[in-house]
Structure formats: C-alpha cells, structure tokens
Image (cartoon, rainbow, N blue to C red):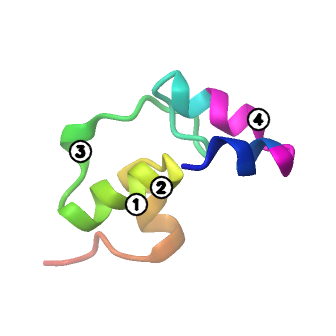
C-alpha cells in the first residue's frame, strides 16, 4: 500500500485501519492465516483487504 498516495486522495482513515490491523473496508481484524494463497497475500500487501472483502470485490472463494 502506498501510504502517501492514499493520503493524497483523502483515504487516510483507510491507511490508519490497515496500520491497526483492520481491513479498510469491513473494519474487521485481518488474520494473515485466513488468506488462501500467495495471490491473496500479495493483494493484502497492496490494498490491506481481508480475504472476505477480496472475494466480494474480485470474486472467488466459491471453489469446490
């Protein structure tokens, strides 16, 4: 996550949430163990999104 870019676009509250270990969308605690694969972990490093929010935004999680 690029903190400076986020703050320029008035998304400082999202930056603060991630710094506190919370998902910036749902505000629930993020558990690194919940990520199902490397791609999800990489996305977390970019956006701070938890696995559930990643699934809602990008689709996924319905594999059987």
Q: On the rendered structure, is 48 left or right of 24?
A: left
Q: Tell me the distance, in whole angstroms, between the alpha carbons under discs 2 and 4.
A: 15 Å
Residue designated by label 2: 46
Provide the residue span drawn in magenta: 8-16
Q: Which residue is mark 4?
A: 12
Question: Does dot 3 land on a helix, a strand or a loop?
Answer: helix
Crowding at mark 2 (Cα within 10 Å: few <14, some 14-19, many 20+) = few
Is label 1 in contact with label 2 (beta carbons under 8 Å)? Answer: yes
Horizontal and vertical percent position of residue 47 = 52, 53
Q: Residues within 10 Å of mark 4 (few under 14, many from 20)?
A: some
Horizontal and vertical percent position of residue 30: 38, 35
Give the alpha-carbon distance from disc 1 to disc 2, as whole Å: 5 Å
Tell me the element at label 1.
helix
Query: Can you name the residue that lies furthest to the front here?
Result: 4
Circle count: 4
Q: Badge 3 is on which residue?
A: 34
Q: Which residue is mark 1?
A: 43
- Give the mark, 1 or 4, whose residue is nearer the N terminus: 4
């Amino acid at each position: 996550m690029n903190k400076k870019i986020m703050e320029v676009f008035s998304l400082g509250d999202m930056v603060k949430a991630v710094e506190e270990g919370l998902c910036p969308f749902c505000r629930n605690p993020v558990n690194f163990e919940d990520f199902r694969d490397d791609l999800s972990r990489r996305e977390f490093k970019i956006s701070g999104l938890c696995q559930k929010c990643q699934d809602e935004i990008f689709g996924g999680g319905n594999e059987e």
